[in-house]
Image (cartoon, helix red, strand yellow):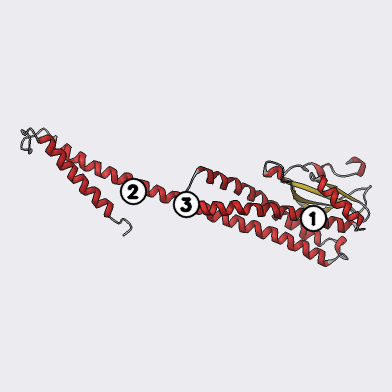
Amino acid sequence: MSAIDLDSLTFAFCNSAEEVSRFHSIPSTVIEGAAVLVLYDFINHYDTIEQQLTPAIIIFNQSCLIIYTNAITVCRQLLIKAINKGSTLLDIVFSCINLWQDRLLKALLSYKKQIDELDTNASQTVKNTELREMTDLTRKLVFFEHTMNDQSETLTAFFDAPQLQSFSHKVIDNTQTRQRRLTKTIHIYRDLLSSIGSLFTAMMNNNLNHLMKYLDSAGLVIAVIALVTGFMGMNVGGLPWKTSTNGFILTCIVALILATATGIYLKRKRFSD
């Protein structure tokens, strides 16, 4: 960096998902009139979303272009094709931007299958596997959403830069459309995942309500039996069957009859009425 007279902060977070997307001019006595553009690329072979969303840094002026990215092989192939076509520096910059946008969109679209599976499972069952998958997917989309919102503002500033005043409006419009498509896709997926999360919550609450209804009903049936046996077990005179050898059996029969009647009543009772 000292050889090209750049601020040390330019590459301070070059491998971090917390890097800030930005576009601004940079003071340099070596690269006069230079500007830095920081966007994001997606590298699928990494394990976590923090590693997959990787910063891509472009430093350029009218005669110089510096690109830093972790996907160096793909970027090198693009540069070779662009040079063979005789592309200008700005053409190469937009080619890189479009490449990174395409890779980001491809990664987003791969999440759609997971969202559809979660949507199907949410209406059938609530298991820890689905909940963990939803949490992991939500985490990925949170990183995506904040990164792309940041990147949209950066590209808006970049498109208004003096260096692009005479550049092809068609290319700029296409890049804007790609970014808008990215942003819209993220927001759609976040809303879908939010609705699925609400459905999971509703399903769990419904299952819990059914369980509590069953436990309360079972408790009431048992309470009827306890009431009868407790009443007949009082140590006072005048109780029926006190001296009968069949008193225990008769008490059990009465308790079972009342418990059965209570159970039938609770089963037929519509608590939603």
The quarter of the picture where residue 219 lies is top left
Mark number displayed over residue 97: 1
Q: Front-most of 40 and 158? A: 40
Question: Residue tagged by mark 2?
Answer: 213
- What whole-number distance in Å separates the C-alpha atoms at marks 2 and 3? 20 Å
**Where's the N terminus, which quadrant?**
top right
Mark 2 vs 3, N-terminal side: 3
- Please state the horizontal and vertical placement of residue 89, each as a whole percent of the image: 89, 56
Q: Amino acid at mark 3?
A: Gln
Check disc 3 and report its element: helix, strand or loop.
Answer: loop
Label 2 crowd bin: few (<14), some (14–19), many (20+), radius 10 Å: some
Q: Front-most of 106 and 29? A: 106
- Please state the horizontal and vertical placement of residue 132, each as a whole percent of the image: 55, 43
Q: Residue at x 74, y 60 (%)?
A: 178
> Can residue 231 be seen here?
no
- What whole-number distance in Å separates the C-alpha atoms at marks 1 and 2? 58 Å
Label 3 crowd bin: few (<14), some (14–19), many (20+), radius 10 Å: few
Q: Residue at x 23, y 41 (%)?
A: 223
- Please state the horizontal and vertical placement of residue 62, each as a whole percent of the image: 92, 56
The quarter of the picture where residue 82 lies is bottom right
For discs 2 and 3, the disc positioned in front in the rendered view: 3
- Please state the horizontal and vertical placement of residue 153, each as a whole percent of the image: 74, 57
Apparent side of residue 9 relative to residue 243 in the rendered image (left or right): right
Mark number displayed over residue 124: 3
> Can residue 167 be seen here?
yes
- What whole-number distance in Å separates the C-alpha atoms at marks 3 and 1? 42 Å
Q: Amino acid at mark 2?
A: Lys
Mark 1 vs 2, N-terminal side: 1
**Where's the C terminus, which quadrant?**
bottom left
Q: Amino acid at mark 1?
A: Ile
Q: Residue at x 26, y 44 (%)?
A: 220
